Image (cartoon, rainbow, N blue to C red):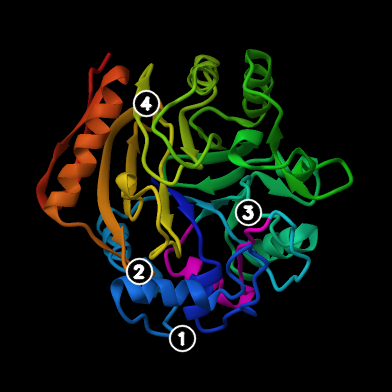
Amino acid sequence: MFLCGDVMTGRGVDQILPYPSKPRLYEQFVESALDYVAMAEKTNGPIPRCVDFSYVWGDALDELDRVGPEARIINLETSVTTSDVHDPKGINYRMNPANIPCLVAARIHCCALANNHVLDWGRPGLQETLISLKKKAGIGAAGAGFNLTEAVQPCVIETHPGRVLVFAFATADSGVPPEWAATAAECGVSFLPDLSDATADRFAEHAGAVKRPGDIVVVSAHWGGNWGYGISRSQRSFAHRLIDSGTVDLVHGHSSHHRKAIEVYRNKLILYGCGDFLNDYEGIEGFEEFRSQLTLMYFATLDGSTQNLVSLEMTPLEIHRFRLRKAGKDDAQWLGEVLNGEGKPFGTGTTLQGSNRLKLEWARS
């Protein structure tokens, strides 16, 4: 399967697509989404307008064609709406629903929506996002719904060997307000109040009630802050508890703007933070040491009978002019060194392969 971190196709990215939203923003220092295009152009050069829908994916499309993953899962950190009911939080991402073919261009199967931007344009914006994904684009969603029952349901991806079930949740420390939680009568996200053992057990029990023999269960978690490599004890304990339940086969973490450590626990993959994958942050100053413009495509191969991890290959890319391009050897080596350093306490490392791809190494049990 293909997994990645935050995909933000709103604001500046939306402005270069064929049907840009109204550029008006409500940020403290920026009033127009076009300013983000201008900042990126000042940093890296001219960006074309009215690009085709596949433009933003760039070299990622060749990699997807090369690998041919049977399940493609992203965290969509953008509201897909024309709603003007902006949340007063200050940073509001939206993409015009008419631009949703840009997600279809990458043949995405599932968008995790439990994150801190999916309700940036209010509950009307979330409702339109759900309709746009499912009814207009035929793309599944997890972690949000028209009510709590829908928000906690998995996105079901039918593959040749069996089903992939994607559950998603968000926590408050990722910037999700508790009032965004779905209720029995109101749309919202799947929100976890804590990462306690009891919460993990309830989550695993819910997933186990849906899982059939041969299914692969992926839990997509929007947790933690934007910067810093630290992984909290509660996150690690929660991920382990989910896997110990015998129900969860892969934990797909995101929220941090950069890549974080990888762990293989009881032969199951835990991605604690996949980093940003696509955004309009070029030209924004601060936290340069994390080099968040460097992104990773995670290609995980799981055994169809045991659901255990067989291999993880990662393709380094770079966001450049709102488009993904293959990273050079020096950048790939730098990413590998970061993953090696952060993964050492977890018993994982990487090796640099041909075409500047990275391969995960771990002690197999």
Between discs 2 and 1, the one toward the N terminus: 1
Q: Is residue 18 visible?
A: yes
The x, y position of residue 171, in whole percent, is 64, 34
User: Is residue 204 depicted above or below 6 in this figure?
Assistant: above
Q: Nearer the viewer, residue 70 or 228?
A: 228
Q: Nearer the viewer, residue 51 or 39?
A: 39
Q: Nearer the viewer, residue 137 or 352?
A: 352
- Alpha carbon separation for disc pair 3 and 1: 24 Å
Find disc 4 in the rendering and name its residue.
308
- Alpha carbon separation for disc pair 4 and 2: 33 Å
- Alpha carbon separation for disc pair 2 and 1: 13 Å
Residue found at the very far right of the displayed protein? 185
- Of circles 4 and 2, the one toward us is 2
Between discs 2 and 3, the one toward the N terminus: 3
Residue 114 vs residue 62: left or right? right
Residue at point 29%, 59% (across, down): 318
Find disc 1 in the rendering and name its residue.
50
Q: Amino acid at mark 1?
A: Cys
Q: Amino acid at mark 4?
A: Asn
> Does residue 100 belong to the magenta stretch?
yes
The x, y position of residue 106, in whole percent, is 42, 64
| Mark 1 closeness class: few <14, some 14–19, many ≥20 residues within 10 Å | some
- Alpha carbon separation for disc pair 4 and 1: 43 Å
Q: Amino acid at mark 2?
A: Arg
Q: Amino acid at mark 3?
A: His
Find disc 3 in the rendering and name its residue.
117
Residue at point 18%, 48% (across, down): 332
- Alpha carbon separation for disc pair 2 and 3: 21 Å
Residue 323, label in figure: 2
Q: Tally the numbered discs.
A: 4
